Structure formats: C-alpha cells, structure tokens
C-alpha cells in the first residue's frame, strides 16, 4: 500500500468515513463560503462530503485521484479539520499533479495556513505570482488570500494594495462593492501618522487615489465647507476612480452633517467630587491633553466648559445648564444611572457622547446619542471570537463568583453560542476563598462527562498527590476562558498545571494585566492570552507620542486602574470629529488609544483591542486575527 493510500485510509478511519455512494457530491470551494463552517450542522454537512471524496480517491486512478484528494482537503479545511486537510495535501506527490492542480494545492495550503492563524506561512506560499495559465478565479483567490494574510499581520496598507490588484479580476457588482469596502476598511486601520508618511503617485494611480481620499477622511475638517472643497479637489484629480461611487457619496453626506459634529463649544460632564472623583479627573486630564494636542495651532477657536456631574442631586439640571451656556455638544456623563435618567427623561437635546452605555434593552434610540466606554462585556465577546478563530471548539468558562464575573461570563457564553457551538463546562470560583483546586477539578470533570463516549478514558487516572498531578490530559475541552484579577489568576494558572491542564490554551480579558510588566510576579501567568488597549500595550497604533507625554506629565502609576481612564479621555475628545463618518459608514474605523473604534446602528462605539500573551512574566504582542478569513 502506497503512502498516499495509507494516509487516505487513516483519514477515513479517523473521521468514521464509509459510504456506498458512487457519485461525488457537489464541492464547496474555499472561495464560497469564504469562512469555515461555524455550526455543528454545517460541519457535519462538510464531513459528509469529505467522506465521499476521500472514499472515491482511494478507488480512482490519476489524475482523478488527485482531484478528489484536493476536494476532500478543501472540505476538511472548511469543517475546521485543518490538521487532516494538511495530511492529505502532504501525501500528494508534486509529480502526480498537473499545473492546474499544483495551483489549487498551493492556494489551499495558504488557505489552511490562514485558518490556523499562520499568515507568515501563507505569504511564503504565495510569494511568487501564479503562472499566466491560471484562471481568473484562481488569480482572484491569490490576491484575496494575500490581502487576508497581510491584514492578519496588521499590515493594512499591504492588504489594501492586494485588493486594488484584485479589483481588476472581479466582474460581479456585489463583489466589486464589497472589495471597495474592504479597501476602505483596511486603509481606515492605518494610523494617521503612517498614512501621512506614505509616498503617493500622481493620478490616475489607483492605490494613491484611495490613500489620498482616506487622508481627507481622517484629517480635521474645520467645517463642512472645507471638507466639501477637499472632496471636490480629489474628485477632479481622480475623476474615474473606483472610490468615486458609494464611498465618495458617503463622505459628501458626512460633510452635510459635519457642522453639528464639529462643535466650537464642548461641555464635559464628569464626576469631580465624591467617590468617582479620581476617575473623573483621569478622564478630564486625558481629554484636555488631547484638546491641546489637536488644537495647538489655534487653541482659542474651540472652547471647553467642565461641569461637575455630582454637584447637586439632579444630572438633568447640570445638562440643561450646559445647554443654556451655549454648548453645542455634550461629553458625558460617566455614571450609567445618570445616563439612563437623561435618556428616560428626554433631556438629551444636544449631540451627546456618553462615557458609558445604556442597557441594550433600554429601547432608547437617537441619531445624536453616541456611547463610548470601557465595557468588559465587549472584551468578553472579543475573547469568544478570538477563541473560535483560533480553531477551538470545546470551551470551558471559569469565572469569578461576583457581579462582574457573572456579567462577563454571560456575555462570553452568549457570543460563543452564536457560532452554534456550546460551552462544555462552566464553573464559578470564589475570589476570596483559599481553594482554587476544587472549582478547577469540577470544571474538568464536567467537561470530561460531556465529551463524546469514544474520547473518555477507559481507565481511571492515577490519583493526584502533593508530589504528582494526575497523569492524563483533560478530556472534552480544548480551551478555557478564565477572566479574573491578577492576584487570583496567578494562583489559578499553577493549579491548572497541577491538574494536567497546563497546556490548555487559556484566555482572559484586560483585567488580567495590571498595566505594568512585573516578570517576578507574573511568571505564573506565562501562556495566558488576553486582550487590552493600545494605551496599555504601547502599540504603534494611535498617537504614541501623545500617549508617552501624558504618562510623563501626569506621573501616571502604570499599574493603577485609573491608567486606562486617561486613554478614555483622549479618545473621548478625538473621536468627536470622526462621529459623522463612523455613523454614516459602517465599515469605517477610528484608531484610538482604547482600541480601534467602530459604531453600530445604535450609536454604540465598540473597541477592537490588541492581543498579547504572557511570556517570561511580561506581555508579548500577538498578530491581529481575522475572524472571517477570505
């Protein structure tokens, strides 16, 4: 039996394949759908198709055998069985393939690398152009995959360049429009400083036209008239540019609305007395610093009035006073209860950027209420998306038994179940208790009980002792969401190792990191993956120079919980001038200190955070991930 046949037999055995069908099923190509199967039903459908192609390949001569193998590998990748898909590809000898099949194999290998979050490997596979004989569809795949890999590496300008090349290969109107949006979204994630440094070529150079238009969109407008003048000049320079359709129209519409969102008198409503005074002062310092940085050439043109939202008993009176004194935009309040009172009372008469969120079921809607905050639920949802995109399917949740922990766990579970998967085990732990071993043992036991019968151990594990942990790996679980505070997480991680779960991928929210690297204290967190804002992880996004100046001028304690509120203040000022574009263009992004901001239909600003992993007791940045690789 040849190596190829052996591999196919093994795959058949592992997947439980066996059928009497004699005709091949239809093949879903990795171009459509562009994302792997998310629900159990989809995965089963793909496995059924892979079963047939794998069986047919064992009984077919070349080149039909290789065609069936490529189809089976394609479908296994779509079902998230990337390891088995790789085994099939590796077993196909290059000399057995014709040129068309070699192209398919290379593209599929790159697609699998993207699914496994290995963008560098994908780009290496796609390092040389396809031969001229390649079909237009395959050439489109080539540029689409390169664009996605660059995006995953955070090289958004490169990603836009690949999509500009892709444009020439597309004929479907919807695909072209989606590609335009993808180019615009990629460029919107290039920070303003980097975008300014890019050297462009004169018209009609297509990529340069995109870059020049994004520069206009990101620049301070100085009013609707100035924005329209800049757009008119761009349109005259690039009269037939692809961005001259829906995107340019949206920018012109934004210019009509930008007068009300380019305020000259801003009211800042913050708690400057009482228990929330430290938080209010941190936000105020960040806000004013961003004001001086942005308005340093003409600091007198825009005026900021600051109001204590805790002065007096009624936030509605504070809001009315700010409106009566000539404010044309309100920033605040910070307190969720005060924001709810303003919304329910109908007091929100001016464009308002609240520094917290209304409850999702509040029923309040307004085109002039925008909401920005540091929502732990948003972080939990992003962790769920990251775990799924990292290829894990059976996930447990170990969370603090308090109000914060329950909120975060609920948000995570709700987001996770959107994929059609379920949580295999969920277990709270007492943050004040001395025993973290018991909840971990309960969680792992529940996961094992929920595992398929064939995966459960046939013999009991050797009991754990003080000197030796159990001698088998956890069953039924391949990743763990473990939100919590640094003090508890430093104890939980060693306990996982004691229970033979030390190699289990563990994810957490930003609360896991104090904000100050402390290798001596955080060495027990090694391997923990978490999300946090650029302000804390000191990434190249946002205004890094301003970030460093604020930290120095205000002598911010890096491991203080107030640290992140300075970033909220900076973003609260700078995002004011992007609210119109974020509202009118769903794919628009704003690079902030709290994260990459995007707006939903309710005016809620969501943060896309950076990712890091603890190594040697300190965070190391991880590449960005794409939850929908194309």
Image (tube, rainbow, N blue to C red):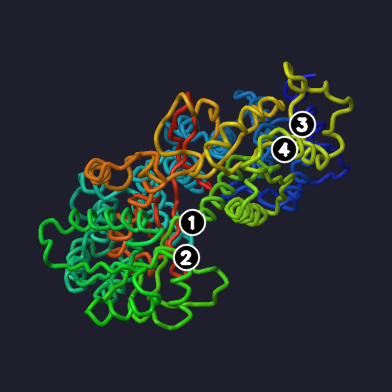
Q: Is 74 situated left or right of 149 in this image?
A: right
Provide the secondary structure element on which disc 1 rests: loop
Residue 391 coordinates in the image, percent (x, y): 62, 40
- Which of the labelled discs sits on residue 477, or is there none? 4
Q: Are circles 1 and 2 on residues that touch, CB within 8 Å?
A: yes
Question: Please, which residue is most extreme toward the top here?
Answer: 467
Crowd class of label 1 (few under 14; some 14 to 19; many from 20; radius 10 Å): few
According to the image, label 3 marks what residue? 11
Of the 4 image quadrants, the one containing the N terminus is top right
According to the image, label 2 marks what residue? 357
According to the image, label 1 marks what residue? 375
The answer to whether one can see residue 435 in this image is: yes
Provide the secondary structure element on which disc 3 rests: helix
- N-terminal of the two: label 2 or label 4? 2
- N-terminal of the two: label 3 or label 4? 3
Crowd class of label 3 (few under 14; some 14 to 19; many from 20; radius 10 Å): many
User: Closer to the camera, 59 or 385?
Assistant: 385
């Amino acid at each position: 039996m040849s190596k190829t046949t052996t591999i196919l037999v093994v795959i058949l055995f592992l997947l439980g394949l066996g059928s009497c069908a004699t005709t091949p099923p239809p093949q879903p190509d990795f171009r459509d759908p562009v994302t792997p199967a998310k629900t159990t039903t989809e995965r089963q459908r793909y496995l059924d198709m892979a079963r047939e192609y794998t069986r047919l390949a064992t009984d077919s001569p070349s080149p039909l055998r290789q065609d069936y193998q490529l189809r089976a590998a394609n479908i296994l990748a779509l079902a998230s069985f990337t390891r088995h898909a790789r085994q099939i590809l590796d077993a196909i000898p290059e000399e057995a393939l014709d040129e068309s099949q070699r192209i398919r194999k290379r593209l599929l290998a790159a697609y699998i690398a993207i699914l496994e979050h290995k963008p560098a490997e994908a780009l290496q596979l796609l390092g040389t152009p396809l031969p001229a004989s390649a079909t237009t569809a395959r050439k489109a795949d080539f540029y689409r995959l390169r664009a996605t890999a660059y995006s995953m590496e955070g090289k958004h300008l490169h990603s836009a360049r690949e999509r500009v090349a892709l444009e020439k290969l597309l004929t479907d109107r919807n695909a072209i429009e989606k590609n335009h949006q993808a180019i615009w979204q990629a460029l919107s994630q290039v920070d303003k400083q980097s975008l300014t440094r890019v050297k462009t070529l004169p018209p009609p150079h297509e990529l340069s036209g995109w870059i020049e238009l994004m520069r206009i969109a990101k620049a301070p407008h100085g009013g609707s008239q100035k924005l329209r003048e800049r757009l008119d000049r761009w349109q005259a320079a690039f009269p037939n540019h692809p961005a001259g359709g829906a995107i340019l129209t949206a920018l012109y519409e934004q210019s009509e609305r930008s007068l009300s969102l380019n305020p000259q008198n801003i009211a800042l409503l913050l708690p400057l007395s009482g228990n929330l005074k430290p938080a209010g002062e941190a936000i105020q310092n960040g806000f004013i610093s961003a004001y001086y940085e942005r308005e340093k050439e003409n600091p007198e043109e825009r005026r900021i009035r600051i109001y204590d939202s805790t002065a007096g008993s009624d936030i509605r009176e504070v809001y009315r006073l700010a409106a009566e004194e000539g404010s044309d935009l309100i920033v605040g309040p910070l307190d969720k209860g005060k924001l709810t009172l303003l919304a329910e009372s109908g007091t929100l008469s001016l464009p308002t950027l609240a520094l917290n969120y209304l409850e999702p079921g509040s029923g309040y809607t307004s085109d002039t209420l925008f909401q920005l905050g540091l929502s732990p639920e948003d972080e939990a949802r992003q962790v769920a998306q990251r775990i799924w995109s990292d290829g894990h399917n059976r996930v447990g949740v170990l969370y603090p038994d308090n109000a914060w922990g329950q909120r975060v766990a609920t948000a995570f579970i709700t987001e996770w179940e959107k994929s059609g998967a379920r949580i295999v085990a969920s277990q709270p732990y007492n943050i004040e208790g001395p025993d973290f071993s018991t909840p971990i043992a309960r969680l792992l036991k529940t996961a094992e009980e929920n595992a398929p019968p064939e995966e459960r151990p046939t013999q009991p594990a050797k009991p754990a002792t003080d000197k030796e942990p159990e001698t088998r790996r956890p069953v039924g679980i391949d990743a763990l969401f473990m939100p919590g505070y640094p003090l508890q997480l430093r104890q939980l991680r060693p306990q996982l190792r004691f229970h033979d779960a030390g190699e289990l991928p563990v994810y957490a929210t930003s609360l896991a990191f104090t904000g100050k690297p402390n290798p001596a204290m955080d060495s027990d967190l090694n391997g923990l993956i978490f999300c946090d804002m650029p302000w804390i992880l000191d990434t190249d996004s946002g205004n890094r120079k301003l970030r460093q100046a604020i930290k120095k001028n205000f002598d911010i304690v890096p491991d203080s919980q107030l640290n992140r509120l300075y970033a909220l203040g900076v973003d609260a000022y700078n995002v004011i001038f992007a609210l119109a574009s974020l509202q009118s263009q769903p794919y628009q992004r704003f690079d902030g200190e709290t994260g990459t901001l995007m707006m939903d239909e309710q005016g809620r600003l969501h943060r896309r955070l950076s990712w890091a992993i603890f190594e040697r007791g300190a965070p190391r940045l991880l590449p960005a991930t794409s939850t929908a690789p194309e």
